[in-house]
Image (cartoon, helix red, strand yellow):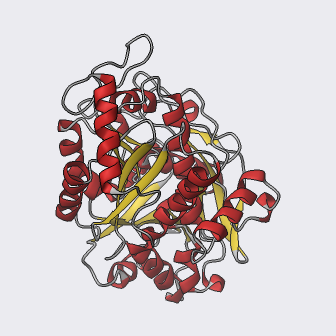
């Protein structure tokens, strides 16, 4: 994968940055302005009248490397916008991608490199709860937007001390609420066995599920955790199989999601309803297990699946497929993580367009004041909305069931804001 998009020569970029700073008359790190002067003195590091530089941190290697597909979708979107739409608000986008191997100390190192050496305007997409947790203090101390991080931890929307960091996808508590509501309707007396990653990600989703089933007939009969350094989760799966559970909640990242699905298929005397969390629900996770072994598995989603024929003539899906083939020809458009990348890049585009000030402060304010923003790759009925006391851009999801060789949506999109109320710290 290319490391950058729309890169200009270093000398030209330096000249443009200096010219912008001089024109705006701000402090040392720049100062944008509007005709009314509302943006004067705000940070313009990484953005000029002609360019905008973003930095992303992903596990391109290591136990969560399946997520390395996401920046390819982002690459396709920004390449398309740069070449055919004049960039974002007339600015060519450069997207610098760094690999942290899903290791928080490495994520901190790469964040510092992006901010201090690459001089990025914003950190766009830091993937993973552990990596984002390790970097958000630094980003907020430096007052660098850490926008649409690729993790659903609820703290990105409930913490009041990190205004420069915000999530994008539905938070794990909201996702857990969707599964709880589904079980209340389909298996109101379910006995649930849980496998979860032993970190903030796993604990957030499981904690949300426990709260959502309080007072119902649903009980958790056994829990098993795993570490990202574990070679396999088969021992945990064998223990869970003896729990008597008729529902299995699979709270894992892709590598371990595949292992859990495969183990479930091999245990002959255990046949629970299998719920796999969204971050491990890609067909790239299911396919190695064998589609015949994952029939009936359920999950929840919020963006369009490129494998679903109902979107074959959808204008955004057709655009996505064409531009993936044109700009990232080595990447398969059918991989949902690529569609995720396209959707979040499109979301950034709309958020930046809505910013009154094309500054770091302007982006921070815009990402926290989204009013039902339409993003064409999101499912019908799913929009971005944030505001005072609501730091969660997307909180609607729809259930889906795996049948044949793809996911099938069922039911209606559930707006968890309306169904359950706000997510509290």
Quarter of the picture containing the N terminus is: bottom left
Left or right of residue 309, residue 161 in this image: left
Quarter of the picture containing the C terminus is: top left
| Residue at 36% in and 19% down | 39
Q: Residue 88: give x, y in percent of width and height.
A: 53, 41
Q: Observer-nearest residue: 78 or 299?
A: 78
Left or right of residue 398, residue 236 in this image: left
Q: Is residue 408 above or below residue 390?
A: below
Q: Residue 352: give x, y in percent of width and height.
A: 49, 35
Q: Residue 265: give x, y in percent of width and height.
A: 54, 84
Q: Observer-nearest residue: 343 or 50?
A: 50
Q: Observer-nearest residue: 33 or 407?
A: 33
Q: Observer-nearest residue: 244 or 1?
A: 1
Residue 308 in sight from this viewpoint: yes
Left or right of residue 322, residue 354 in this image: left
Q: Outermost residue toward the top? A: 36
Q: Outermost residue toward the right? A: 313
């Amino acid at each position: 994968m290319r490391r950058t998009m729309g890169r200009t020569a270093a000398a030209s970029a330096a000249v443009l940055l200096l010219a912008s700073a001089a024109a705006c008359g701000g402090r040392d790190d720049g100062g944008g302005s509007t005709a009314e002067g509302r943006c004067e003195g705000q940070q313009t590091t990484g953005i000029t009248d002609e360019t905008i530089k973003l930095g992303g941190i992903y596990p391109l290697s290591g136990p969560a490397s399946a997520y390395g597909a996401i920046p390819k979708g982002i690459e396709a979107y920004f390449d398309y916008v740069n070449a055919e739409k004049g960039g974002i608000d007339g600015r060519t986008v450069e997207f610098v991608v760094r690999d942290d191997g899903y290791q928080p100390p490495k994520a901190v190192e790469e964040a510092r490199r992006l901010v201090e050496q690459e001089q990025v305007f914003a950190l766009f997409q830091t993937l993973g709860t552990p990596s984002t947790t390790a970097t958000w203090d630094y980003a907020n101390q430096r007052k660098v937007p850490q926008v649409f991080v690729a993790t659903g931890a609820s703290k990105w929307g409930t913490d009041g001390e990190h205004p420069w960091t915000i999530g994008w996808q539905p938070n794990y508590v909201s996702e857990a609420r969707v599964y709880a509501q589904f079980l209340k309707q389909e298996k109101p007396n379910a006995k649930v066995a849980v496998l979860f990653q032993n970190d903030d990600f796993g604990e957030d989703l499981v904690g949300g599920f426990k709260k959502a089933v309080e007072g119902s007939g649903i009980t958790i009969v056994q829990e098993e955790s795993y570490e990202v350094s574990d070679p396999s989760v088969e021992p945990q799966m064998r223990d869970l199989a003896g729990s008597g559970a008729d529902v299995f909640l699979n709270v894992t990242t892709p590598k371990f999601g595949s292992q859990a699905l495969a183990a479930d298929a091999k245990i002959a005397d255990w046949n629970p309803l299998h719920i796999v969390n969204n971050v491990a629900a890609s067909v790239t996770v299911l396919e190695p297990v064998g589609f015949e072994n994952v029939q009936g598995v359920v999950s929840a989603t919020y963006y369009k699946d490129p494998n679903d024929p109902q979107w074959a003539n959808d204008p955004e899906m057709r655009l996505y497929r064409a531009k993936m083939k044109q700009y990232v020809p080595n990447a398969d458009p059918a991989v949902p993580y690529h569609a995720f990348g396209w959707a979040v890049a499109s979301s950034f585009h709309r958020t930046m367009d809505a910013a009154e000030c094309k500054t770091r402060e302007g982006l921070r304010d815009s990402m926290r004041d989204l009013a039902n923003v339409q993003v064409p790759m999101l499912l019908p009925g799913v929009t971005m909305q944030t505001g005072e006391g609501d730091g969660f851009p997307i909180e609607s999801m729809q259930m889906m069931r795996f049948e044949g060789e793809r996911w099938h949506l069922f039911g209606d999109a559930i707006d968890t804001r309306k169904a359950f109320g706000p997510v509290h710290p």
